[in-house]
Amino acid sequence: MNTLDWNQLSAAEQAAALRRPALEQSGREAQVAGIITKVREGGDAALLDLTRTLDRAERDTLELTEAEITAASERVDDELKAAIELAIGNIEAFHRAQLPTPVIQDTSPGVRCELHFQPITKVGLYVPGGSAPLVSTVMMLAIPARLAGCERVVLCSPPPINDAIVYTAKRCGVDAIYALGGAQAVAAMAYGSETVTKVDKIFGPGNAWVTEAKQQVSSDVDGAAIDMPAGPSEVLVIADEFADADFIASDLLSQAEHGPDSQVILVTPSRDFAARVDEALARQLTALSRADIARRALSESRTFICSNLEQAAEISNAYAPEHLIVQTENPRALLPRLKNAGSIFLGAWTPESVGDYASGTNHTLPTYGYARTYSSLGLADYQRRYTVQELSPQGLRAIGPAVELLAATETLDAHKNAVTLRLAKLEKQA
Amino acid sequence: MNTLDWNQLSAAEQAAALRRPALEQSGREAQVAGIITKVREGGDAALLDLTRTLDRAERDTLELTEAEITAASERVDDELKAAIELAIGNIEAFHRAQLPTPVIQDTSPGVRCELHFQPITKVGLYVPGGSAPLVSTVMMLAIPARLAGCERVVLCSPPPINDAIVYTAKRCGVDAIYALGGAQAVAAMAYGSETVTKVDKIFGPGNAWVTEAKQQVSSDVDGAAIDMPAGPSEVLVIADEFADADFIASDLLSQAEHGPDSQVILVTPSRDFAARVDEALARQLTALSRADIARRALSESRTFICSNLEQAAEISNAYAPEHLIVQTENPRALLPRLKNAGSIFLGAWTPESVGDYASGTNHTLPTYGYARTYSSLGLADYQRRYTVQELSPQGLRAIGPAVELLAATETLDAHKNAVTLRLAKLEKQA
């Protein structure tokens, strides 16, 4: 890791050291727009054609049949099914605990204001393909959708879809599985086709094509909303000399193996500890199947030597990491100082990978500094909040004159008149 | 109003009748991008220059001084101050009731998952200028910011800023008031200048320049997040023959006077009632100062005659109105059927204008069909949700093997190794 002494850096150098690399412009705007147009105009036929040419997969139908789902599920071995079951139990427990309670508040006598929650009607989930079946992505996206009460939950993944993905989708209550990938999958869910349900909101990660397509459909009011902006995965670790260097090295490598653009940062007050982590990294790297990817990510990684843990917290707050691991003598003591992180992992026995798979928290998190304003994916992202109000005659008498005056101040006569008419009627009735 | 019999329309005609007019392309993309570049490069000097040329206002400073604020506040009359006070009390009460409680859940023994809430650090509020001082906008944007705990709350409004806006901003705890309008105000808050605080998120309505600038800064990761997409204001009213035609006409006019592009829809099973509303509209229109605007909006408005109230709810759900007024014999009975509305007003004594000003609900609502996925503005929009997790050795022993298997399935060795190393260490300790 590249080791820098934080307090030797100027403010400008500190800012530069925390800067993420510029996001590559997708350069695919026009191509993706072309795919979206094809899908909107050609429907199922266009989707099957795009699947043939882009995914090189021959299928006659887009939706997996019950027979295909059953056959795929039977091919998943029982040990994996048991692990999935354990993860589902924890993810369900934590997301069920997020179910909101309506707010009902009388703000004045006779003036009742309410905040209610409603599921988004139809949602679409995207699960990338590739060699590794991302069963965790299926669980993280589908479980809160079902708990939130969405009426229809559909899932797209490029063919051939791995059996474990099919099994997990079915197990998590997904209503329809489409063998569709890339920009064409996003377009299909945003605008619908003869077979594919048009959804209100699209969730899930993807490559540059998927990301660009999500961006485009979300800026079209006839398209679909999306979960959050995308960016490369990242971790920041705060550790002191009480941490286990082997554990920290394994956590840094968990991030580094995601991709060569993964961001890996260690912040520690102990120069000696940083050196021990470097040794452990070298040792562990040799055993990894994705060592090349991890090595490239580590070549861009940084260790900051800081004065103390308070300063470590400030550095983390300035960076706003997706994942924040805290392995110190008393990690919970630092929690009140920690801001702008997507998910925080406390203590030696809480590696990031538990949250990626099975502790119960969601692994869909804001990256690239978006943690300053965006939230960790949760049940709330599958619902909408709306207000309800009801005034009694007493309530209108109490606040009506203030509304009349405020409306008059804003020169909105009709707003005022809607109250004046009613107060006059109440006057007559009295 | 243009009256249509819903059940005489084909499905395509029904969809067309609910379609909103296409949003005018701003055509200002390049000009707004130019203003943003000027502000980023020129800072305060550029802002003062733009204010001179675009707003035709001469000022030496951007921020209002304490002396200016005090003088402006003293010029606001006491009756208006009392109305503002009443509104603030109700808005505070309803938004305070929205303060969230952290979720703490042990998903398995020794596996603790938590959901916490944190204020967004710095927020910027935009209040449009013009002849009418939008004091309600100040209250709706600033009160939840302060209750959420945002560290810094700043406000921009084009000069000269009306005294009532200055007074209300100060009263609601805004930290700094900048005499800045249009795209340059949005750029200043998104990127900062010598005087203007760079904020994390920008809230508030505005004209086409402001809307375009918000769009542009929100798609730049170095810019700022924004509250929600913009669109013209709209109301849908569900009424039966028990409603008061004068009341309904006054509510429709409250919407129509906002602007010629305001959307006004009445849905009723009673043809006779619809005719009575038309008469009341004609009567009330003559007395309005903004009658011309209202008349133009009404020329595009629609009344749908439907079979019954259940069908009225379906029509409303398909349209997804910003404001939904229900004046029927038993309005609350219809509530469980109502979806996709920003704010719902129940009963004869609850005109939309009470929610616009003083009942306590927020008047910042999703328009243009965005109510299908976006929420009514609330305390939650000024906070971010993040997760925390902590495992004990027992917790890791319980879920570690499942994490190892799931990570191996996804071919992420290092993710698996982070658990394996720790389980081995626990084994040795035992």
Image: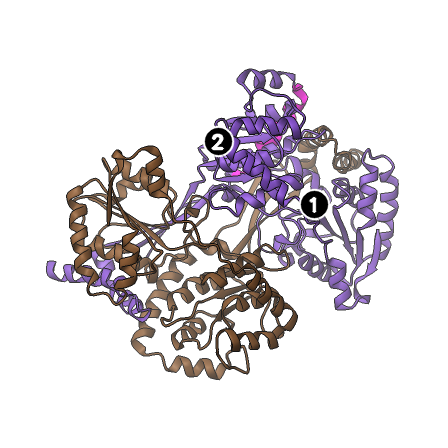
Chain colours: A purple, B brown
Residue B272 vs residue A206, the one in the foreground? B272
Looking at the image, residue A388 lies above or below residue B131: above
Looking at the image, residue A119 lies above or below residue A8: above
Q: Is residue B242 visible?
A: no
Q: Is residue A83 visible?
A: yes
Q: Which mark is residue A233?
A: 1
Residue A97: image x %, image y %? 51, 40
Mark in the foreground, 2 or 1: 2
Q: Residue at x 23, y 65 (%)?
A: B288
- Residue type beneath disc 2: Thr
Count how many numbered circles sit on residues in the image.
Answer: 2
Reading the image, the residue beneath label 2 is A197
Identify the secondary structure beneath mark 1: loop
Q: Residue at x 54, y 77 (%)?
A: B62
Residue B173: image x %, image y %? 47, 70
Q: Are marks 2 and 1 on the same chain?
A: yes
Q: Mark 2, chain letter?
A: A
**Which range is magenta?**
A76-95
- Tell which circle, 2 or 1, labels the residue nearer the N-terminal end: 2
The quarter in which the C terminus of chain A is drawn is bottom left
